[in-house]
Image (cartoon, rainbow, N blue to C red):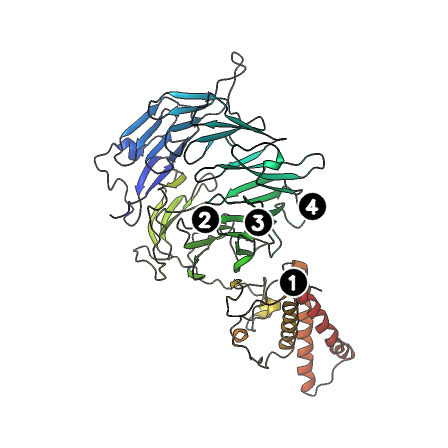
Amino acid sequence: MAPPTPLLAVRGSDGTFLLRGPPKCEENADFPSCKPLFFRDPRQSRYAAFSKDGTFFAWCNGEKVTVVNVADGSQVRLFDLPKTAMLEFSPLNTVLATWQVYSKTQDNPQGDPNLQLWDLKTGSCLKALYQKKVQGWCPSWSDDEKIAVRSVNNELHFFENNDFNTIANKLHLQKVSEFVLSPGSQPSKVAVYVPGSKGAPSFVRLYQYPNFAGPTSALANKSFFKADRVNLLWNKKATAVLVTASTEVDKTGASYYGEQTLHYLATNGETSLVQLQKNGPIYDVAWSPSSTEFCVVYGFMPAKATVYNLKCDPVFDFGTGPRNAVYYSPQGHILILAGFGNLRGQMEVWDVKKWKQVSKPQAPDSTHFAWCPDGEHVVTSTCAPRLRVSNGYKIWHYTGTVLYKQDIPAGTELWETVWQPFPDGTFPERPVKYQAAPSELGSTEAKPAQAYRPPALRNKPVTASSKLHEEEPPQNMRPGAAGDKQLSKTALKNQKKREAKKAAKQEMNPDVPEPQSNPSQANSTPTEPSSGDPETDKKIKNVKKKLKAIDELKALQATGKPLQKNQLEKMEKEAQLLKELEDLQLGV
């Protein structure tokens, strides 16, 4: 049986409709007999959402909340809720949650409940609740709907079997500001964050429901000081959580975006601070669907991207580049690094099993990216209000070809594009292709842009001192990945010293070929990695510049021309500069 074709929901100022997914990408192609209201509602929708399994689709258009069956377009429910701003399905499609902005009047100073929970089978309201803040408005359900939880006055209220009239359990800490319920089957776990106060540190704890009897009942506990807000990210198997802690202000003044740290907590009690190899912000973090690895994009531009294992050891380093986001395919066999927002939209598509780059397309001005559930296609879109001009969307094959392109007419805006989700296992993993998929629209492979060089450096060979950034190539960091044995700390230190001496000699005598006794050294790239400290990199460049000037003086002296006194004094400092270069490269 052939796998189904995912649909793409498109919501904008000209209405809401469903687009048949790749490869044909046609509107209303499979459903000619369905009602036009389902496939293109011309009224402006405030919100639209699929159910978790993709069976139902719902939207609110300022008049009604409509729920339809995606398979045949039939109407499931119609709710008279004109003020609805958000809606969400429970995992098993039992409950539809709707939320509207909280308001009160002189006649009704308390206001009306603005969060309603509806039974989709009967259409009746199960419970009406007060939820003033839009953040965390929707209850969180376990995948089997046996547990639901919501935050009320800094404590967590747990409900069982969708009975919202009875609080089955409570988790009360000092001030719970964030929580995330674990995915997957029972037993359910919950990660909670409590911000620090009065000199006490912030902390994140993992609990297993319903064991909430004090801090000793926590599965794991991690405390830290530098945190104004956190982002909690469970892996798919619910065995570990990644915590990105952020401060609003970097007191060192190194970053405009504040300061970020990444922490790892496992349900077996293990905790760790993830050691990043470059200073700067943490742009994005993503778990692999296998739950055994995670990727981090971090550091001052050009940013680094590194894959870590569950011991928080680096597995593969993608080097540096213009990127600020990472996306794993639903099957986990492909990873895309991208630079959206204020970057040019460059995407790097990688085969995760072979650590080999597949393609490098470019989607400029993109504000949204999402993998199609089939793991073969992606959508990029330019949406308002982030950008109000040149709105539109493209559907791509991961090899870099554009299969479908839609530009939004002038005077209208695109607000959102959402793929129809499917249960796990619907689309099996396919072998990775390296040849571009055929398409009439062709590919947008990014052409290598030539860096600007001042007139004084043009028509001259590119040297390390003339580069704006030290580019780092990708490298496999698994022990023994290149056939070498894992070195001890002392051996690694001695190896770094030898490499620094060789680099210094090679810088002094660029015409003399370097002896290559080891094949692995012969194949290694000559590009030197950044130290991670911009000040140190700047000092290294200055020292290399002085050594290059001494080389030029030596060449001048070899022609028989007499040198001035200050030039001879510069040449006498050669040994001192070499020693300084070695210390800087070793981090002494």
Relative to residue 378, is residue 532 drawn left or right? Answer: right
Residue behind mark 1: 537
Is the C terminus in the top left, top right, bottom left or bottom right quadrant?
bottom right
Amino acid type, mark 1: Asp
Q: CA distance from mark 4 to mark 3?
A: 17 Å
Mark before the other along the chain sequence, 4 or 3: 4
Residue behind mark 2: 365
Identify which residue is drawn at 54% across, 41% down.
232
Q: Is residue 516 above or below residue 27?
A: below
Callout 1: SS: helix
Amino acid type, mark 4: Lys
Amino acid type, mark 2: Asp
Res. 251 mark: 4
Disc 2 + disc 3, Cβ < 8 Å: no
Mark before the other along the chain sequence, 4 or 2: 4
Residue behind mark 3: 282
Q: CA distance from mark 1 to mark 3?
A: 21 Å
Disc 1 + disc 3, Cβ < 8 Å: no
Q: Nearer the viewer, residue 476 or 223?
A: 223
Relative to residue 564, is residue 423 drawn left or right? Answer: left
Callout 3: SS: strand
Q: CA distance from mark 1 to mark 2?
A: 32 Å
Q: Nearer the viewer, residue 211 or 526?
A: 211
Disc 1 + disc 2, Cβ < 8 Å: no
